[in-house]
Image (tube, rainbow, N blue to C red):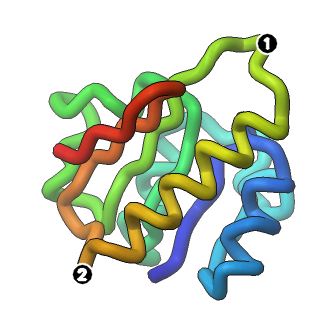
Amino acid sequence: MQFLLDENLPRSVAELFKRKGYEIVHVLDSALRGSPDETISEYALKDNYTIVTSDKGFSDIRKYPPSKYDGIIVFRFRDDMEQALILKLASSVLNQIALMPDLKGRLILVEENQIRVR
């Protein structure tokens, strides 16, 4: 599995994914920096990346139908959430992913108190 981490999430989340053995590209470290959501989604589709973002727009299944993607993970948290808690949520997601054979076609919504898989 390979992941594309949107620029609205800290680099520490990318480092966590790498430590767990996943291939991950942070948008901030690529030519996609500052790109609109449509460009990021096209890149993910073309190169088979699972999108990891806190941009709630990606949870709109009409605009970004999960069936077209190798997976979409959307973090929904308060703007003032501490980085340590974001990392804790990311770790929980990685534990959940480890139980799934495949993310293709799935939308995972990560909230402070729950993780929902569609």
Q: Residue 110 falls in which quadrant of the image?
A: top left
**Residue 102: where, in percent of width, then height?**
25, 76
Look at the numbered discs 1 and 2 and tell me whether their residues touch, using CB distance below 8 Å. no
Task: Name the residue rendered at 60%, 43% in the picture.
Answer: 89
For numbered disc 1, what is the local secondary structure? loop
* Residue type of the residue flagged with mark 2: Pro
What is the spatial separation of the Cα atoms under label 1 and label 2, in whole angstroms? 34 Å
Q: Nearer the viewer, residue 49 or 95?
A: 95
Q: Is residue 51 left or right of residue 7?
A: left
Q: Dot 1 corresponds to which residue?
A: 80
Residue nearest the observer in this picture, 67 or 79: 79
Q: Which residue is pictured at 37% across the width and 51% down the height?
A: 72
Extreme residue in the front direction: 113
The dot on residue 37 is none
The structure residue drawn at horizontal position 39% and vertical position 62%, both measured from the top left corner, is 96
Element assignment for label 2: loop
Label 2 neighbourhood size at 10 Å, few (<14), some (14-19), many (20+)? few
Q: Nearer the N terminus, badge 1 or badge 2?
A: 1
> Does 70 sit above or below residue 7?
below
CA neighbours of label 1 inside 10 A, class few (<14), some (14 to 19), many (20+): few
Which quadrant would the C terminus be assigned to in this image?
Answer: top left
Q: Classify residue 25 as left or right of residue 29.
A: left
Q: Position of residue 58 (x, y in %)?
A: 39, 34
Residue type (three-letter) at the residue carrying disc 1: Asp
Residue on which disc 2 sits? 101
Where's residue 86, x and y in %?
71, 38
Q: Identify the residue at image location x=24%, y=81%.
A: 101
Image coordinates for residue 77, horizontal then vertical, percent: 59, 21
Q: Quarter of the image for the N terminus: give it.
A: bottom left
Q: Residue 80 lies in what quarter of the image? A: top right
